[in-house]
Amino acid sequence: MTYRSPRAAVLTGLGSWLPPDTVTNADLEATLDTNDAWIRSRTGIANRHRVSPGMSTSDLAVEAGLRALKSARSDQADAVVLATSTPDELCPATAPDVASRIGLPGVAAFDVSAVCAGFVYGLATAAGLIATGVAERVLLIGAEAFTTLVDPADRTTAAIFGDGAGAVVLRAGDPDEPGALISLVLGSDGGGSELLTVPAGGARRREPTEHHSRYLTMQGREIFRFAVRHMTSACRTAAEQTGWPLSDIDRLVAHQANARISNALGDALGVPPESRASNIEHVGNTASASIPLLLDEDNASGALTEGQRVLITAFGGGLAWGAATLVWPSLTSVA
Ligand code: COA
């Protein structure tokens, strides 16, 4: 899909929040048959954040959303889109509660569910709301209490996933100004849905059984291969649609699933290591929160600066993937 509209969605604010509780590799070593060397070498992860008892996705989303609005220097938005695969309840959506608590009662508010690709799907949703004139400003939040899906006895998924939230504000603007989303590419393959799934607890199997867990099950090796293949292809398409040779990319902001996946992607695209954004070491895989968390961190540290050509990409369960391009605008980070 080439995204063309006289009313572009322009990035104008961003923020993020991590719950204070952490789980280090040493913490995992204490309860699981694993070790720091294995986790670091196979995933690049040393630490993750985790919701404390009683805390949930909406709590993370509110914190990140408020910071994004502050960064955008406005407390207004016409829509709140929440990308999450861990809604507070199966029904209703969590976004209306988040919108009310942020001080935006009455605005359009709904969830987008595309697991780790949720934020890129959310960008396309926000761009659509703006292009059609339904909204002037959209608050897009990616928030996950993903550790609530993880079996504490499963050393593979326990080592990978963490919790957190990131948010951006998009406003209607000119397609040629910095911050305007230029290309948006989305894809999915339901044939791979079994590779990453929570088998029980949904409408198909309400209660867990011996063979169908209420926890996340993952076939890591297959996911790894599909992730590299689909993100590489989505990135090539997005860069081509934008008219950027891959050698022109200043910052590759890829979903933080595994450092080896990001490295394989960067190598396949020919993007040098110093141009690849990464924070997986201290946050792990935070699913739909991963990209906005990384954008906020890179903006705050000065790794992302005005005028850089940015290529965003994500892959997750579903299977679902996507990519987006923009020229980085001048943005204020809020602590
Ligand atoms: N500590 C120690 N050993 C572990 C371990 C851990 N935390 N997790 C798995 N292992 C073991 C496996 O049990 C297996 O043991 P075995 O050979 O005795 O059966 C061995 O390590 C190798 O497992 P394998 O799955 O082949 O390892 P891998 O190199 O593929 O790495 C992942 C496993 C999960 C880290 C990797 O496949 C991955 O990251 N996949 C993508 C997952 C992902 O990104 N999911 C989210 C999608 S957005």
Image (cartoon, grey):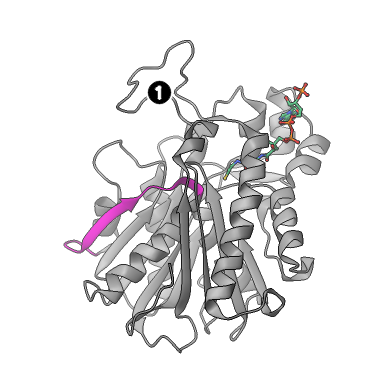
Which residue is drawn at the image coordinates 33% and 78% (left, top)?
A: 74
Q: Which amino acid does label 1 sit on?
A: Ala
Check if residue 111 falls in the magenta segment. yes
Ligand 1 is found in which quarter of the picture? Answer: top right
Q: Does the magenta stretch include residue 273?
A: no
> In the current view of this chain or complex, which residue is farthest to the top?
210
Residue at left offset 49%, top offset 52%: 117
Q: Dividing the picture into quarters, in which one does residue 301 lie?
A: bottom right
Residue nearest the viewer, comparing 165 with 137: 137
Residue lying furthest right: 37
- The image position of residue 118, as x and y in percent, is 44, 53
Q: What stretch is highlighted in magenta?
A: 104-116
Q: In which quarter of the image is the N terminus?
A: bottom left
Placement of 280 over or under 326, stated as above or below: above
* Ligand 1 contact, mark 1 (Cβ < 8 Å): no
Q: What SS does tag 1 mark?
A: loop
